[in-house]
Each structure stands twice: as structure tokens, then as C-alpha cells.
Amino acid sequence: MSESKVKTLLEEPLRVVNIGLEGFAKELDQQGVKVIQVDWTPPAGGDTKLANLLSKLGT
Amino acid sequence: MSGVIVNEVRKGFYLDSVALMRFSRTIAGLEGIEEAALMMGTPANRRIMSDAGLLEDAGKAAEGGDLVIGIRAKDQKSADHALGESRALLDQPTAKDGDAAVWRPRTLRAAVKLAPESNLALISVPGDFAVAEARKAIRRGLHTMIFSDNVDIAEEAALKREAHELGCLVMGPDCGTAIINGTALAFANRVPRGDIGIVGASGTGTQEVSCLIAQYGSGVSHAIGVGGRDLKPEVGAISTLMAIDALDADPGTKHIVLVSKPPETEVAAKVLERIGESAKPATICFIGADESSMPANATQVFSLKDAARVACGMNDEDVKSADAGAAVSIQPGRSQVRGLFAGGTLCAEAQVIFKAADFPTISNAPIPGVPSLDKANGGHPMLDLGEDEYTQGKPHPMIDPSVRDDVIIEALKDEAVAVILADMVIGYGAHDDPAGYFAGILKEHGVEGGPLVIASVTGTEEDPQIRSIQMAKLEAAGVHVAPTNADAAAWALSAIRSNG
Amino acid sequence: MKAEMKVIEDANREALKRMLSGDPVLVDVIPAMEAITELKERMILHAGPPIGWDGLCGPMRGAITGIAVFEGWAPDLEVAEKLAADGAFDFHPNHHFDAVGPMTGLTTLSQPVMVVENRTFGNRAYCALNEGLGKVMRFGGNDDEVLDRLRWLRDVLGPAMSKALRSGDGISLKSLVARGLTMGDEMHQRNVACSGLTLRAMSPALASTSTDTEALSDILSFIGGNDQFFLNIAMAMGKAIMDPVRGIEGSSLVTAMSRNGTDFGIRVSGTGDKWFTAPVEMPEGLYFPGFTEADANPDMGDSTIVETIGLGGFAMGAAPAVAGFVGAGTASEAANFTRTMGEITLGENPEWTIPALDYLGVPTGIDIRLVVETGLSPTINTGIAHKEPGVGQVGAGVVRAPMACFEQALHAFAQSVGVS
């Protein structure tokens, strides 16, 4: 099962969600790859306790 | 209420109340204006205007379908000016072109909603958050490439196990380079498509091998990064095995190259067993490892250059270059080669070349058998300047070459140094002119009769920085430019040998 | 996936399903005492989470003294205030009695309330009639003009609407709201289209059940001249839709958001009827001539039930003009408000769509986990009341729900599913 899914990645055009450095998204865009940039901020405003709680509640 | 009150009524002129409230705020803020409002003349509105001391006879006579301008000003001049401004606003109420606000999703969840066909998440957030984001990605069926480092290895292993169950590939953490289906991701080069597939646990190793494949006239089907620790026993090569599976099944891949640091025996055995199950020939480069037994379809190589050469089906002679190192003389009394590398695996490859020639090296990122920097005196120092001790709080030298300034200047001034050995890595993600920057440092700090400088450029002609232009800039600065990183190391050896 | 995550996912799926399957119908207008049988003399239902007289803001106090005179509990405002301060009145949130009210949102014995029935689940919710603009009780107005209008609503409009609605099968609100969205309403600041559609739907029955053409004329011109007439219907609809979603174990969906002018409160399905409160914030917006931020009262009212069901600030993209209260006020900005709210909701409503956003469904089902994770609190479109009793509305704008409510709720919710 894993084989076929990764194989599919190698066969299809890449469509990227970029989370983090915007430069990567720009360079993908220059290569004509569809990319969507996430305007990421640390979860729960960087409150690690809350973020940890959230990760257990599965968002 | 004091002041001059001016009213103007526009019969049968409708504008939205919020738009009018915005205009009112603008006019009320003008110099010399005590209060102002633009409103439709409904009874309720006229009452509000009346309470605010804004109505005179003209306004009082307005009806619901009329627009009323009411201005109370300190003097007639201010009132007239405000009335003029009000008219201008009403006559040109439309928004300007091109000021449309762009929406960007704040979360992976929203991004996938917006682009449900997405198939890869490229993650470069701080390491503390990277696994959480990757987990969200794989749970939505996305493969991931994690550029971030500083991820706990147990978390990496857990993530990869979950991803494996879901059939998703995790490239990384600390995966700097991948080329999927012709697309360069993060730090990668524009190489032609071909039938050689690369599985790389090393970013610069993958870059050097893929660029040399291009230099030797072949091309790359895919270069799948797996992250520097995938072949550690804790992780057990989960991503490496998935990558080999995928390349084995990929009809566009005819030859598989595996580049990694030497794995431990058990992991190496597992990976080589999988390689052996494939009908495709493979080239294995465990950089710094000793010779070991290989499956029948696999060839072990010891340098990145040989990995590319063998994968391209070429002989040693095919890729031989004139050894510039043998032809130069170095200053008497100088004997040290100092390697100053931006690329970790390029640093390792230089150590391999020196070790094979029985020349001792020391390094902050030693290959097996090489002592670490702080534990030995003597030996040619080979520095990986991308390691933490140089990049703490700073960007990687491939992004910001100034990280290398101090050590270059120090080497230029050190009278023991005979040869400075350096790498220039170009391509996506990298600095836009590392050679030009390096040449500038040499020009400013180079001394007459100082060390010889030998370098190579990892990249291709199609890269944004253009390899030949980078090489020309180095040559113009007096640098001896070798065709490969391995050749550069060999030239440095020749230089000190011929003068020894 | 861990067991508790599966529980949450299933519970939220159920919660969203109940929200989207609601079938709200405006069926009647009846005196509050008939609708809410628990109502007694000197009992006052108010907007927002529970609060006592001492904690109440100016407009709320103004409205309470007014309603005390209206109900005949005090001869004048002065006495009414003294009675209130002496603890003569019994205060409870509307939300505890199947009701909602805009701004001050007072509900008492003899006021007429509109009845919205959720035909899928059989529950009913109530909201008083909208008084129109200007000096009104919902903004703390309490003079004779205000009280006279309340009497007219009680004696003329309420009974007339009741007869009209009872003569047919009521007005189905789901499709009416869907049309309103395509006509530029977001159902909180903008109710022009839906008010018109409601009037159009009711007019024949109002006429055929009327015996007094002068009264009929007054009724038609009152509804026709009140762009916000539908707001109170939308609120009763919101309450009717959300009540069946309450108390689903493991659901992190918000079932109510509400403010009393002092505190903002939310309720979450999985934590039952507990309120999570924090000090309410000041709206950002535009003011009527003669007024500034210095005059404004903090945010107030049960009307945030409209945002809870995906309308109001969540449907800003349908009513671009409303975005003009903050920022540049462009249509693209309005669309961004709606898309951003999509970051904190579990789904979209396929029946309530926005043409200008390529028929994107309004973001539906606020999930406290997503609010806390993204740091994006719900955007609420609101009116702004004067902080002094009796003055009324001074502006309109946009306000954010305080993040602290959602953080508190998250901790309690985690405990409820055995996670710490």
C-alpha cells in the first residue's frame, strides 16, 4: 500500500503546501509548481502548555 | 452650538450607510471642522443629525431618498473646503484598482481545504513545531518534506512509523534537498530529467551527485531525501526503504543511487537486502565507510564523484581532469591544507580522499577513523561550517556565506596554511552569488605569497546562479577551480605532495 | 488515532450534523409569559452570561429601569432604579430559558416574543420584536417614547403578527436566509433583504387577518421602515438551531456566544451548560455624528448567536459594505473575514452560500480547539451603545470574542474527555 502511494507522488505533478520559509514557495512558483503558502504562527500563540493540550485533543 | 452650519442635499442619491459613515469620519477629521455627517435623509437620520447640531433648513427638508451633507465648521472657509471635499468623495466613491486584499491560510488545515489536490507539505518551521505540523500533513494524506532540524529522534521515529502506516513518505527532518518529478525542493539544483534515482540521507551529497550526473551528460528521475538520521538504528531507515520501494517501482528509474553516512551494520544489512531484491542496478555510497559486501546488483563507491560516475556508466578515464594541483608551487614552510566547507558531505568526501591517500585529517564532523578537531593535534583540518558551532543563531553558510568570513580570513593570514580548500554550493535556496562573495573576501584579505586556494562549484548551468559564471568569478580571483569536490581535494593533495 | 480523538471527531460530526439539519420556522408571536412559563413578576431575563445588578453596565441598567416601569413594577425610573439596587428583581440569562435578546436583550412577562420552531428536533426558541433604530430599549433607552413603542409592539404588532403567522404554516427561515445571503445580508448588521422578504411573505396574511386598516398601515410601515427587523428573527432562529446541539459528550463545538455588556460568555457542547466568561472587549467601528469611542459601551447582547451559526461576521463576504466598519472596507477584505473564520470552524453550510465567494458555504460550527490553536477569535458584527443609560445607539462596528473564554473552555473540555 505504501509503495503505490509514494509511487503516485512520483508520477503526479507536485502540489505543495509550504509551511515556513517563504523563499521555498517563491522558488517553487518560479518552477511553475502549484504552491500555497501557509501564514504560519506557532500554535496557541506560542503557549507550549496549551499547544501540548491541543495536540492531545487532535486538531 | 457655535460655528457655521452648511447643508447640501442631493436629491435621489443613494449610497450605502457604512460607506457614508466612512466619508463622515473623513470629513469630520478635516481642519476647522467641528462635526460632519453624510447621511440618507430618513427621519431617524435627520434626528441624529439634528441632535449633533448639523441641520439647517435645507437638510431639514430632505427626504428618505435624498443624501444630506451636514457640516459644522469653525468658519465659512473651513466649511466650504469640507463641502468641496464631500462632493469629491461622493463623485468618486469607488475603490482603487489593485488594492484587493489577498487571503492566505493560517493553517495547514485551511490550506488543504483551499487546495484539496495538494500532495506534499514542505515544512520549515522551528524544530519544536515541525513534527506537529508534519503529523497534521500525513493525517491528511500528504507526503512531507521536513527541512527543519532540532527534532527529537524518538519523535522522528514515531512520526515515520505513523506515516509508514498511512503510506506517506516523510523526507527529513533536516532534509535539505529533494527533486521530485523534476521539481527542485528547498536546496536543490536544476538537473535534467533522466533515469537515475537518488535516495539521499545527505543534502549536499545529493546535490553534488545530481549535479555531477548532469555534468556527465545523464539525468535524474527523482532525488528523494530522507533526512540525516533515517539510517540510525532508532529510526531504522523507514523512509529510505520507502524511497527505494518507490524508485524500484518507478518505470522512469533505471538505476538507484544511495548516499548516506555509514549506517550501523544492522540497518545497512536491512537496506542492502532491500536493494538486493530489486532488479535494478544500484550504486551505494556510504561516505567514509570501509569496503563491505554488496548485493550482486550493487556497486559500492567511496566518493560522491564515483557515485555519479558509476551511475552514469563511465570509467575513471572518462571523467579525469588535468590536475592543476601538481602544476603549482606553494610557499616554502607551508604544509597545511585547510578545508572550509559549507556542505557537510563535501567536507566528508574531502576526508575520504585524504584518508585514501594516507594523509591525516582532523574535523569537527569527522568520518570514521578521523579524529575530531579537539582530540588531535596535527592533521589537515577539514571544517564543516554548517555545523551547529558555527551556525548557532545564524543562517547556514550556503544561505549566508559571511558565516565563513572569519575562518577564511584566519586561514589567509595563517603562515602554516599552504592550501585553502573550499566549496561553492549554488542552486535553489542557496546564496545568489557565493563565488562573487568569496572572491570579494579573497581580494580584500588575500596576502601576497599567501595560501593557494582550490575550490569547486556544486551546481549546474541551469541553476539561477549559473555554474560557469560562478567558476569564472573564482578563476578571476586566482582560485584554482576543480570540476568536482573530489578533484579539488585531490588537487590539494597533489599540491602539497609536489612541494613536500 | 487515540481513543479520545476518535470520540471528539465523532461527537463533532454529530454536532455539525445537528446544526446543519435544523429546520427553523417562524411560527408565532406570543406573550413571553406564555412562551416561558417559568417567568414571574419581577423576573428579568437579560442578554449574556449570568450577572447581578452591581455588575451591570449603564445601558443595561437604563433598560432594566425602563422595563420595570413598562411592566408596572415601579411608577417611574427613579423608583425602579432604587428597587433594582435593593435586589427587588430576579436576574437570569435569556439563554437559560430558550430565549435570546439583542443588546440589553431584556425579556419580561408581558413582552411579545417571536417563536421559532426547529421542526427537525421539535424545540422552540424566543426573541422579542425588533424596536427599530434611534432611541430604543435594547440600547438602554427608557423614556416615554421607548416605552410607548414597547406598548405598541405588545398591543398591536405582536397580536397582528401572531394572527398572520397562525393563519398559515409559518415562514420557513432556512431558505429565506439563503436568499438573503445572495442579496447582501449577513444577518447581523445587514438585514435589509431578509426584513423585506419577511414582510413580503407576511403581508397577504397580515392584510387578510386585519380588521383595522390604520393599524395595518402602521404595521407595514413599521416593518418596512426597519432595516434590522429580521435580526431578532435570525437570533431566535440561531437559538433554535443551536439548542439541540447542546450537551453532546466530547464535542468541542461552541453552542452559544453572548455578552451582557460586562462579560463575554461562551458555552461548548461537550461541557454542558457551563459558561466560560471573560471581560468583554470594545468594538472597533464608526460612530454617528456627535459621538466618539469615548461614548461607547463595551460589547453587549445575545445577537452573537448569529455568528455561532455562521452568519454575521462569519458571512461578511456576503455583505462587503459591513467590512467598511474596520480596515480598508474592500470587498476582498470582507471575503477574507469569511475565509479566516473558516480556519476556526468544522465545516461549511452547503445551504447558506455566498455567490461572491464562488458559492462558498458560510463557515459553520466554531471549534474551540481551532480558535485556541490559530489564535483567531470569532469576528462579530455589532451595534455600539452609549455607555450612559437612556441614550441609545451611537455607532456600529466589529468586535472580537475574548480569547480567554476559549482557553478556559479548552481546559474544561480536555478534562471532560479525560485529557490533561
Image: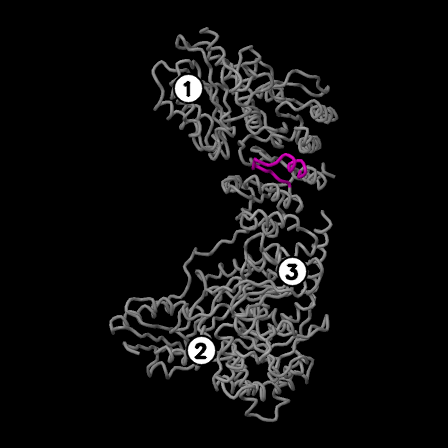
* Residue at mark 3 shares a chain with residue at mark 1: no
Q: Is residue B144 magenta?
A: yes
Say how the picture is coloured. one colour
Residue C367 in view (yes/no): yes
The span from disc 1 to disc 2 (Cα, nearest Å) is 79 Å
Name which residue type carries label 3.
Leu
- In which chain is the residue bearing label 3? C
Disc 3 target residue: C253
* Residue at mark 2 shares a chain with residue at mark 3: yes
Q: Nearer the viewer, mark 2 or mark 3?
A: 2
Disc 2 target residue: C391
- In which chain is the residue bearing label 2? C
Identify the residue shown where x is 59% and y is 31%.
B193
The picture places residue B460, in percent across and down from the top left corner, at 51, 28
Residue B250 in view (yes/no): no
Q: Which sits in the foreground, C11 or B453?
A: C11
Name which residue type carries label 1.
Ala
Disc 1 target residue: B411
